[in-house]
Image (tube, rainbow, N blue to C red):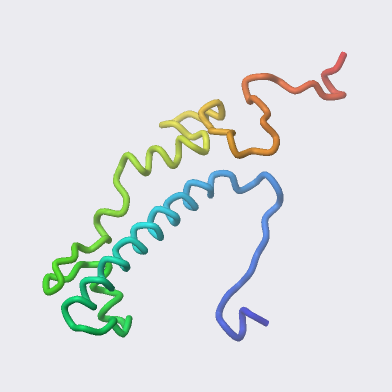
Amino acid sequence: HAESEYGIRIFTEEPNTSQFLQALDQYNKKFHDSYQKTLHAYRMAYQQRHGKPPSMGLVDFFSILSGSGELNIPGMWFIWCDSIDVINAWRKVGICGNVLAPEGICRDGFIDQHDPTVSRVTSANAG
């Protein structure tokens, strides 16, 4: 129903198959945080210059992304993420260069604090 009405297709994945997508989640969060910060600065500068809040139409949206010389607001499009952010995002999900390094994943927020360097005992290898 949502796909035909809104053009949105909802899908699910099997458990434990999408860890690599977490790096993309980090990019999205960084982009969102940068956009919100620039949006706030844009609204404040617009209000100060024009005496009213911006309408937040397409022109305002592109001014936030690309910058506004009139309001002296730098755009956030080219500064929201750099190469170090990209490397760190992949490192946090255990991909370092051309190797998998699960020991590099920060597990502070995990419910299961399993240490990947310690093998688990299963019924298959229990002896």
Tell me if 28 is positioned left or right of 1 in this view. left
* Relative vertical location of residue 99 with respect to residue 63 in this rendering, above or below: above
Which x, y percent locates residue 7?
Answer: 55, 79
Q: Dividing the picture into quarters, in which one does residue 33 lie?
A: bottom left
**Residue 35 vs residue 5, the one in the foreground:** 35
Q: Dividing the picture into quarters, in which one does residue 32 lie?
A: bottom left
Q: How many marks?
A: 0
Q: Residue at x 29, y 82 (%)?
A: 53
Query: If the image is split into quadrants, where does the N terminus sit?
Result: bottom right
Q: Dividing the picture into quarters, in which one does residue 5 lie?
A: bottom right
* Relative vertical location of residue 30 with respect to residue 116 in this rendering, above or below: below
Q: Residue at x 18, y 83 (%)?
A: 50
Tell me if 22 is positioned left or right of 115 in this view. left
Q: Residue at x 28, y 82 (%)?
A: 54
**Residue 92 vs residue 48, the one in the foreground:** 48
Toward the top, the furthest residue is 127
Which x, y percent locates residue 19?
Answer: 58, 44
* Relative vertical location of residue 114 with respect to residue 60 in this rendering, above or below: above
Which x, y percent locates residue 83?
Answer: 30, 42
Which x, y percent locates residue 98?
Answer: 44, 31
Tell me if 127 is positioned left or right of 30 in this view. right
Q: Residue at x 49, y 37 (%)?
A: 92
Query: If the image is split into quadrants, where does the C terminus sit?
Result: top right
